[in-house]
Image: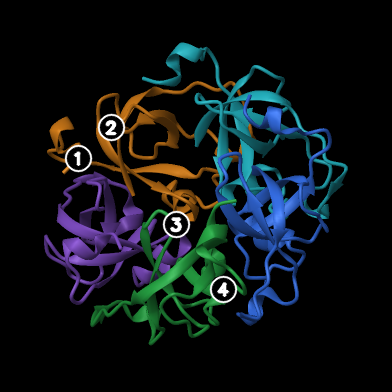
Chain colours: A orange, B cyan, C blue, D purple, E green
Amino acid sequence: MKIQRVARDLVSTEQVTGLGFMSLQVVEDDRGNVEVATDPVGTKPGDFVFTISTSAARYAAGDATVTTDLTIGGIIDHWTEERWRS
Amino acid sequence: MKIQRVARDLVSTEQVTGLGFMSLQVVEDDRGNVEVATDPVGTKPGDFVFTISTSAARYAAGDATVTTDLTIGGIIDHWTEERWRS
Amino acid sequence: MKIQRVARDLVSTEQVTGLGFMSLQVVEDDRGNVEVATDPVGTKPGDFVFTISTSAARYAAGDATVTTDLTIGGIIDHWTEERWRS
Amino acid sequence: MKIQRVARDLVSTEQVTGLGFMSLQVVEDDRGNVEVATDPVGTKPGDFVFTISTSAARYAAGDATVTTDLTIGGIIDHWTEERWRS
Amino acid sequence: MKIQRVARDLVSTEQVTGLGFMSLQVVEDDRGNVEVATDPVGTKPGDFVFTISTSAARYAAGDATVTTDLTIGGIIDHWTEERWRS
């Protein structure tokens, strides 16, 4: 699982039905690369999170039929930008 | 899920049967790397989209028997090239 | 799916049984990195192809029990080396 | 499977239910990149481990419903930092 | 599938039960990056092999319950270090 930071939510009016009404968040890594993750946790911008990929992302979304490849798994306690690289 | 831009459609006369008659799009990232995605949404060149990979790509294509590893999940509202990197 | 070029076939006398008698091709990307793909299409060296990875590779091979993680999905019409990067 | 070193445990009070009460470890590679892995083995900081990704990570966690994409598979005997790159 | 070279076997006394008694090999690519693969073929150090990843790795191990994400698929005939990059 990757450690990423929530940047902002993503709005997509025209999308496949498989994502239901799940919240989508733009998440970024320590190099500024961005990805999009489904968010069953309810995060806000700035939260450090760990994200789950591949088939586990579907299960973590709460329903294995959700067509996601990246899901926020949880908010990390006590993480700071300095700890991003050990 | 990755944020990519639709570049052009891809024509392949000789292909495996598992892709059916799905539209194929060449998508590119912010570094100009290209990939090929199935398109159940109906995008056009220049659209910024998010794409779904791994097993979820098959489900997102509308039919889990479609043999794709990358499917366009939706068109992103209000995205510009400047927002590609945070 | 990735865009790759067929370089040559690969010979492996001693292999797992799960690949059956499928043709194996060495494919390369635009940086010269090589991978190995199962080939249900019947390609020849120099063909530009798109390749399918992860679980869809098994289904694309024509039989989901084929133990491959990369399968040639089709030959791309009208592709040239110049179009490899947009 | 990747060779990584256990850095420290990760605390996440607010997380998806799919991870149960599994221990989470921050693991790092030889370049200092960090990831998060579920730990059914019981490792401690400094241990060199190999980690299992994709769908096998769920099975390795002892229960395929665990929503992880990276699981510690074992502690490596006789590994040192010098052997990390051959 | 990737082309890698067998470097040495890996010993792990304390490991998850899902790997059974499968032989584990350290494999390296042309840049010296190392990974760990299950070996149902019976390779020896120096062999050039192709390796199978994701869910196909489990099937290639001979038993889909083996919790591996990388399995040696076969020994490549007539491969030399010079052919590693085309």
| Above or below, comparing residue D48 to residue C3 in the picture | below
Query: Which residue carries the number 3 mark?
Result: E30
Q: CA distance from mark 4 to mark 1?
A: 35 Å
Pointer 2: what residue? Answer: A30
Question: Please, which chain is the residue tagged with disc 1 on?
Answer: A
Vertical placement of residue C4 versus D72, above or below = above
Residue neighbourhood size for the residue with mark 1, other residues' Cα within 10 Å, grouped as few (<14), some (14–19), many (≥20) = few
Q: Which is closer to the viewer, label 4 or label 1? A: 4
D47 and E7: which is toward the camera: E7
Snapshot quadrant of residue D46: bottom left
**Rendering quarter of residue C57:** bottom right
Q: Which amino acid type is marked by label 2?
A: Asp
- How far is the residue under mark 2 from the one under mark 4? 35 Å
Q: Nearer the viewer, residue C80 or D11?
A: C80
Q: Report the residue marked by disc 4.
A: E73
Q: Does dot 2 land on a helix, a strand or a loop?
A: loop
Q: Which circle's residue, 4 or 3, is located before the other in the chain?
A: 3
- Circles 2 and 1, Cβ within 8 Å, touching? The answer is yes
Distance from label 2 to label 1 (Cα)? Answer: 8 Å
Chain label for disc 4 = E
Of labels 3 and 1, the one closer to you: 3
Of all residues, the one furthest to the right in this rendering is B13
